[in-house]
Image: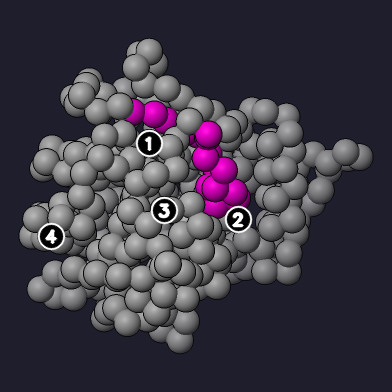
Amino acid sequence: MPPQVRLHQIFDWDSPQQNARLRRELAAGLLQTQASIAPKFFYDKLGSRLFEAITELPEYYPTRTEAAIFSEHLPAIRQALGQGFTLIDLGCGSCGKAGRLFHAGVMPSRYVAVDISVDFMRDSLQQLKRELPGIEMMGVGLDFTHELALPDDIPSQRRVFFYPGSSIGNFSPPEAARFLRGLAEQLDASGGLLIGVDLIKDSALLDAAYDDALGVTAAFNRNLLRHVNARLDADFGIGDWQHVAFYNAADARIEMHLEARRPLTVSWPETAGRSVRRFAAGERIHTENSYKYSPDGFAALLASAGFAEIEMWTGPRGWFALFFARRAE
Ligand code: AVI
């Protein structure tokens, strides 16, 4: 990494302590009656690349719809953010969204890229620094879904948290409220939160966005098992599992699962011997929820989490919304 881009690797897959915590978390999820794997395990290097590919699919409207809202409302967004702020990009991935904002003239004085996929983040940040050498940049490898413990050398004044892409939808509403409250507590009165939120819409559009014709989302979902095999030394046969995604209207969320194509046994090493989980044909592992909100519902969530002065921008079809909010006094 060039010297002008600092990297704090708080999260490290290979630290024995964190690795042990993640292994415990994975094993606990797999041994539940309804097996589950947390969505953060999607993002190894290949998973991050597959997600980038998803954002280019014709069916996956959120990324391009959000980008169009940014373009259309740029002056208002620029005015809301002001100047001299530190942009903290939570789950920066390729840093592409922040990069587009900077190229459009929305310039922070400092950019902090945060991601669990540390190698992918480092490469992306280096590229961005080459393009925009005038912005101070820092990378933080962090599992912020576990704990938002930012390094001390990020000034606490004028922080703007940037959480685009409706990643907030990957938390349940109570978890989202807790997470947002944690953000509000780390803001001063001149900072804020710029957040993208996917809205409730026709279920056929939602189903297609998470089960595309090319099968990229299926590959993204099944890649999770490759990653779990590597982290847990498990023996998932990738071809034994099929991608299932559907909109659950009662809970206003997309659900993604991996479904066993036949009766299966999966095992991984434990202190004494191996843990074994049996799956019947058709049994599923729940891998992700992606909650969708109404504009009023999300504004109410922000208010309940300690935010005020809430502004919202949306596109002509009302598919997606961008919110800016400040900490309530
Ligand atoms: C990262 N997150 C907001 C994406 C979503 O839409 O929930 C992850 C994703 N899963 C399948 N496609 C995209």
Q: Earlier in the sequence, mark 1 or mark 3?
A: 1
Secondary structure of the residue carrying tag 2 is loop
Circle 3 residue = 188
User: Front-most of 168 and 45?
Assistant: 168
Which amino acid is tagged 3? Asp
Q: CA distance from mark 2 to mark 1?
A: 28 Å
Q: Is residue 285 left or right of residue 252?
A: right
Q: Earlier in the sequence, mark 4 or mark 2?
A: 2
Q: How many marks?
A: 4
Q: Which mark is residue 37?
A: 2
Which residue is label 1 attached to? 112
Label 2 CB less than 8 angstroms from ligand 1: no
Which circle marks residue 274 in the picture? none
Whole-number angstrom distance, CA of label 2 to CA of label 3: 35 Å
Q: Which amino acid type corresponds to the residue marked 4 in the rendered image?
A: Ala
**90 w.r.t. 29: above or below:** above
Amino acid type shown at disc 1: Val
Specify whether 148 is left or right of 21.
left
Q: Main secondary structure of the magenta part?
A: loop
**In the drawing, what numbered circle is on residue 76?**
4
Q: In the rendered structure, which amino acid carries the disc numbered 2?
A: Ile
Q: Residues within 10 Å of mark 3 (few under 14, many from 20)?
A: some
Q: Nearer the viewer, residue 304 or 281?
A: 304
x, y percentage for residue 324?
Answer: 28, 62
Which numbered disc, 2 or 3, marks the residue that appears first in the sequence?
Answer: 2
* Picture residue at 58% right of the left edge, 35% below the top: 11
Precedes in sequence: disc 4 or disc 1: 4
Q: Is residue 89 left or right of residue 145?
A: left
The residue closer to the viewer here, 86 or 242, is: 86
Tell me the magenta residue range: 137-152
Q: Is residue 38 visible?
A: yes
Where does residue 215 sit, x and y in percent of width and height?
Answer: 33, 54
